[in-house]
Amino acid sequence: MKETLTLTTGQGFWSALIWAAAALATLLLAGLLWWRGRREYKRGTEQELPFLSGERAENPGVGALHLYWGLTEALRPVLERLRSWHSGVINDYAGWFVVILGIVLLLVLV
Amino acid sequence: MIGNLPFVACMVLIALGFWTLLFKRNLVKLVIGVGLIESGVNLFLVALGYVRGGVPPIYTYAPAGAPMVLPTPQALTLTSIVIGLATTALMLAFAVVIYRHKGTLDARKIRELRG
Amino acid sequence: MSAHIPILAIAVPLLGGFAVPLLAKLHKGLRDAWALLVVLFVGACVGYVAVHVFTQGLWVYVLGARHPQETLAPGGFPIRIMLVVDGMSAFMGVIAGLLALVAFPFALRFLPEEEGKSLALTLGLLLLAGILGMAYTGDLFNFFVFLEVTSIAACALIGFRTWTSRAPEAAFKTMLLYSLSGLLFLLAVAFLYGEYGALNLAYLARELRGTFVDRLALGLFLAALLMKAAAAPVHFWAPDAYGEVPAAKALLLVVNTQVSLYGLWRVLFTLYGGLWDAGVGWLVVALGLLTMVVAAFMALVQTDLGRLVAYGAVSQIGYMMLGVGVGLVSLAGRPEYGLVALKGGVFHMLNDALTVGLLFLCVGAVEWTKGTRDLRELGGLGHGLPEVALCFLLAGLALAGLPPLNGFASKILIYQGSFRLSPILTAVAVLASILLLAVFARAFQGAFLGPKAEVPNRVPGVFLLSMAVLAVGLLVLGLVPGFFLEGVVTPAAEALWRGRALYLAAVLGG
């Protein structure tokens, strides 16, 4: 029975049951904190309205495309390079295949 | 030396095919490039099975004791030709559809899917 | 009758596929029932074969012999075409059968009648037949034929929507690269035939000596199959293809990629078992790392939901290559961690099939209801499609390898195995996983969170059923991984790890 639930990896083990117990405990703790939350919060009042920098924001949705803006901005040179490899020109793709063929043959024959 | 000529020819064909794939921009020419590589491979297969002075591998017509050309590579080549016909037809059909949509066959301009 | 099941698993979808348009002339309902029946039959066949192989060992089926176990012609030479099903083949068959069983009911509802549904079903069944043929065959030329069958069927499906401008473009590029890889595979087969005069995989495996021609053939096999399996940097066709194929059929395309990877393992472990230096193993590991990182980065900047999921699918190929590649590097000494990593890589094939399959089904459901997959226009679907949102979240987390889902179970094996070889490998793999988590958080927010959006169509019950099957699979595989690891994955991994001698003995005797 234990074998079906646990995964031994040679250096340790992984059991979903233990994980589930830990997750349950964490959830209980979080629920406890949430339940003790602020009493002055009222549903259905202006407290639910979104604000951005203190201003009422009409359409506050941060679109998915704005997510990780900092990361993509920081990695822009890398990402641009990667995108330029996916150029969409079939000749380039054939060229990459020739490159891989060359590398593999070099590795195998030499 | 003359016996190696078919092998030289198929390597030249394959090299030409790769050249076409790398440097030609017209989609139809690219399909021709694949066809060149395919011809090279088929020629290689047939040339492998040839036995000098051999007779066609048909038992009924072969004189007794005569060496036969290997039949298996010929069967393989036939299969490969049929498959090649299907792939070529499919690629040309897609080239036609692409031309209808975009009005061009230039590989550099057909890059709606990128990045 | 039961002695012929391996060949029936290939023959029935092949013939049944061509019967589909004929039956459509009679009655549409009859055609749908027929397609389902064929897929159910194939599922039963691969299940039977798998149980048989996992309990009783290799199953060899010879075509054209007096009885199907007669492997050698008079003279002791394996001249006939044969199917050789070992643990790994049976495992691939199970994956293909499982995804087909999920994909076809979905496709029957997903494909509109006026968009040539009958032909799409035919192509789907042909693709399935080709995949099973590649998994089961024990003959190199047969492998090439089935490889081309899958190429043609897959590309016809990719370019199926000829009225869009993107689909034919994706199909043309994919077909060109597929035929290139197929031709190089054939060239490699021709080299081996020229040297040894045989096409039988087991016979060639016994005869190979590591000469110049053998090595040349190995290089050609490697390049061809890496291309077909979408390893970076020759993965460029994969996002186009996965993104443009009708979503219900993307599942079969995922299996097609995996079975090409299976072909690579077959060539490296069974055909060339141990003839190369460790360089080839390191190449597989390095390309695996490159694949996962490049694909994860590219997924981060996608705005099309289908293309984003496609890049996610490509990145998973990298994990399989890493896991099995570590096994390959350490094959000479056979240390314990090599087997652990190998098991992880093989296990990840099953997990990837379920996870990516579920993601593509979710993409299909979103496309069905909203008519678009553009993340710039989507949003707020979670209110109207809570079931789809839940499935997408589950699958996204599983793909990123979060416990307790199935992706974690296989990834921890890969991590632990590769850590012993070099910690750098594990670090890169974990980094790619974190990136994937970011990718799917972004995709989930873009499609399902936000202000409530109108949902014009309800999701049909069949969609939900297909998705529920895969979602339950994700959870079950994650919660009791040991059960599946022992029952299914270990026989498959052992077939690669030590099964070469058994494979040769089953075909050649002695």
Image (spheres, rainbow, N blue to C red):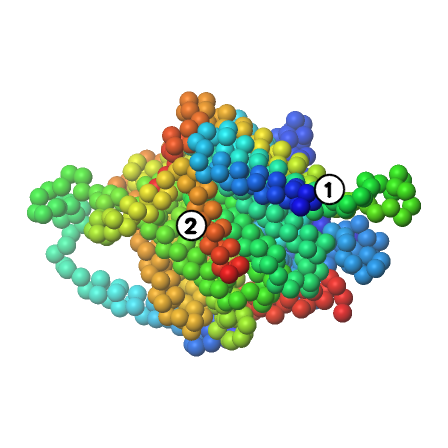
Give the structural element (helix, strand or loop) at label 2. loop
Q: Is residue A87 visible?
A: yes
* Front in this rendered view, residue C354 or B39: B39
Q: In the rendering, which numbered label is found on residue B74?
A: 1
* Front in this rendered view, residue C149 or C200: C200
Q: In the rendering, which numbered label is found on residue C233?
A: 2
Q: Give the label, 1 or 2, closer to the camera.
A: 1
Image spot of residue C34 (x, y percent): 65, 38
What residue sits 14% from the left and 54% below the top? Answer: A41
Subunit bearing disc 2: C
- Graded by Cα atoms within 10 Å as few (under 14), some (14 to 19) or many (20 or more), the crowding at tag 2 reads many
Q: Quadrant of residue C28?
A: top right
Subunit bearing disc 1: B
Image spot of residue B109 (x, y percent): 38, 30
Q: Is residue C94 found left or right of A39 in the rendered image?
A: right
Amino acid on which disc 1 is placed: Gln
For the residues beneath circles 1 and 2, the answer to whether they share a chain is no
- Graded by Cα atoms within 10 Å as few (under 14), some (14 to 19) or many (20 or more), the crowding at tag 1 reads some
